[in-house]
Image (cartoon, rainbow, N blue to C red):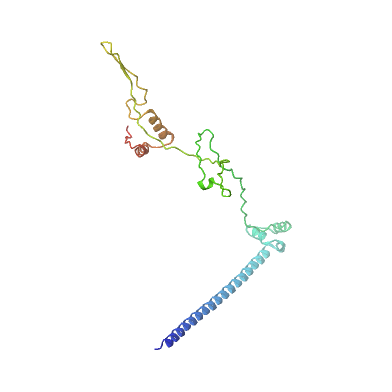
Amino acid sequence: MPYSAYIQIVSTSSNKNDQNQLKRKDALIIRLQHDLAVALQEVYWAKLQIQKLQETLRQERIARFGPRSETLNDLQLSLLDEEPSVTLDEVAAEAQREPLPEAKPPVAPKRERKPHPGRQTLPAHLPRKEETIPCAPEACTCPSCGAATTVIGYDASEQLDVEPVQYFVRVIQREKRACRHCPERSIVAAPLPVRIIEKGLVSNRIVVQTIIQKYGDHLPLYRQQAILSREAGVEISRAT
């Protein structure tokens, strides 16, 4: 088969496929338009039916409450309909009153916009440690004349920071003295500082910190044990 004939067959088949797709799309559009028209017609007839039922209900209420009720609106008629025994005098008195306003959907109250409190300031009693960040080297030279620029001020900002706790071993060396000239050579040692736990493994600061964290911060002993093991590498049992 010549190549030109093959190209002609392929183009003819592709044209047929495109035409079939267009026909299917047109048929789908026509069907959707028909369904939409039917739905709109059904909605229109439903609205007419609702209006007819509302008017029928109104006529029944007027026939029940008398001719004076013709001046009442639908809301007043619905309120009278809820009363089990309504006299004609009550209907006449209701007709002389001003008509009740139609119920409106509730409107959400507008939220009062409070002024922004601004940036919170840190307490003045905390110590300040200043840190100066210099400009880049290329910013220290004027791009116009090439002269060195001068510091004219600083843009200061504050942020709360903390230094990590550092554990260390406190070595207490008590001085011991003795007289080399006396035959008895009595030895005198400096007194041991007062400790909360005698012969304890931890200092008074650790004991106080443990009590504050347990009863003030509600931090259980097993968590304090894990923190001490992680940060100091010391294993101390909770019984201790």
Q: Position of residue 232 (x, y in %)?
A: 35, 36
Question: Residue 56 at what x, y percent from top left?
Answer: 64, 68
Q: Is residue 94 above or below residue 125?
A: below
Image quadrant in which you'd find residue 65? bottom right
Q: Is residue 222 left or right of residue 35?
A: left
Residue situated furthest right in the rendering: 96
**Above or below, 151 relative to 62:** above
Nearest to the observer: residue 14 or residue 51: 14
Q: Is residue 71 left or right of residue 35?
A: right
Residue at 42%, 32% in the rendered image: 212
Q: Is residue 39 above or below residue 62?
A: below
Q: Is residue 171 above or below residue 17?
A: above
Q: Is 35 in front, or is 200?
A: 200
Number of disc labels: 0
Taking depth in this image into account, of 193 and 68 the one nearest to the observer is 193
The location of residue 235, given as percent across then percent down, is 31, 36
**Residue drawn at 56 percent across, 77 percent down:** 34
Which of the two residues, 6 or 12, is positioned nearer the viewer here?
A: 6
Q: Position of residue 62 (x, y in %)?
A: 68, 64
Q: Quadrant of the N terminus?
A: bottom left
Residue positioned most to the top: 182
